[in-house]
Amino acid sequence: MFCVSLNFHNTDVSLRETFPHGPELLDSLEEGVFLSTCNRVEVYGVGDVYAFAEQWFRDYKSKLFLYEGDLAIRHLYRVATGLDSMVLGEDEILGQLKNAYEEAHAAGKTGYELNTIFRGAITAAKRVKTETLLSKTSVSVATLAASACVRFQEELGGRRANVLMIGGSGDIGGKLLKDLWSYDRFDLNATVREHGLREKAAAVEYRERYIALRDADIVISATKSPHFTVTQEAVAEADAGRAEPKQRLYVDLAVPRDIDPTLSPLLTIDDLQTLAEHNNELKRDAASEAETILEEELETLFKDLAFHDLLPLLNDPPPGAPALTEDWKRLLYTFREEASADEFRSFTRVLLRLSQDETEDDT
């Protein structure tokens, strides 16, 4: 397996948002999963990683992360468990990863290797969620953005703040609306009704967003539009005739960006990384426990993959290769349980090599 990755570690949002491709990347792979979130664009596949990167990521080669074999698997497990997230332990990534895998599986783009690895990663993430405080004390992108909105509302003198949400039917936008509603400090307006708070947020037609923006103290945008949903020129036109400029906070949760960067104060996905740093400090102990679980799960996975390579030898040895006796099989199963993954993989490589040598000698 390999992984090609553009993520918040190696690129900022201004570069990630220019990436022009989607799931069509998988057309050149027999097996592949495409993951795209606000913080990462990644392809997990089986094949020649360098040829694939040259075909699809040529313009991003100086920033690209490439992983192969165990490193690719380990990276996937860290992504699934939230250990590679901007906000350590955040919850959204597991759901996004599951959706990406399920879409690839439904499209027939996953075989035994990717199925086993992705299901193992999801299992590891569930263990981390259940057995550690990493996600129980999680501060997600949505809650970090909500906290920033609360601080801005307090700067307004504590009065209720008027919020306009543009889009927001996805995970982050919906959670942000729920968080803001829970504070009971905001009057909520949204251009969509599918966010699950129909009785809490007033519906606004998208084409009338600038009318609603005129009274808004906080403007949040989280769409998949390829163009700005809020521009400086349109805001200036909406505010025309005011005696004093309107003080607003703009929160852009989209990739590509939705809000004209000339507007301020503006909070973007990349800005949330700074807000996440303090939260991540508090999670170091939980992260250490999660790392231990990750290693345990990887040990199991590596042994499972190695054992799968032995199945033809166990069940239907090739002509000329000696069949394993029942004693050998019992030894193999026992050694699988007791040995480390590295030891078991070395042992299986020796068995496969011996089987190949016997087959060649017989011919």
Image: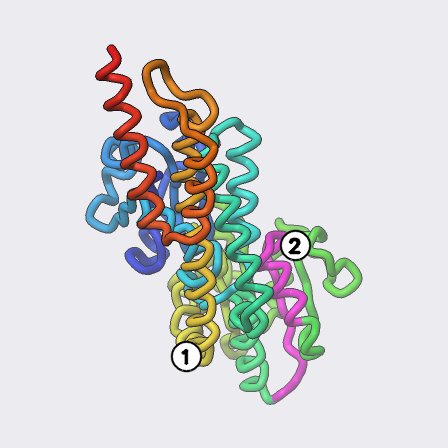
Q: Residues within 10 Å of mark 1 (few under 14, many from 20)?
A: few
Left or right? Give the position of 113 relative to 204.
Answer: left
| Residue 181 visible to the viewer | yes
Identify which residue, 303 or 234, lies in the foreground.
Answer: 303
Numbered disc in front, either 2 or 1: 1
Name the residue rendered at 43%, 30% in the picture: 325
Observer-nearest of 69 and 199: 69
- Name the residue nearer the viewer: 30 or 265: 30
Decide if residue 243 is on the left or right side of residue 23. right
> Which part of the image, by quadrant, shows the C terminus?
top left
- Of the pair 286 and 210, the residue shown nearer to us: 286
Name the residue carrying label 1. Answer: 281
**Percent of width and height locating residue 44:** 39, 40
Residue that sits furthest to the top in the current view: 363
| Secondary element at image label 2 | loop
Q: Which mark is residue 191?
A: 2
Q: Which residues are magenta?
A: 158-180
Q: Position of residue 207 (x, y in %)?
A: 62, 49
Q: What residue is drawn where x is 55% and y is 66%?
A: 142
* Residue 88 part of the magenta-drawn span: no
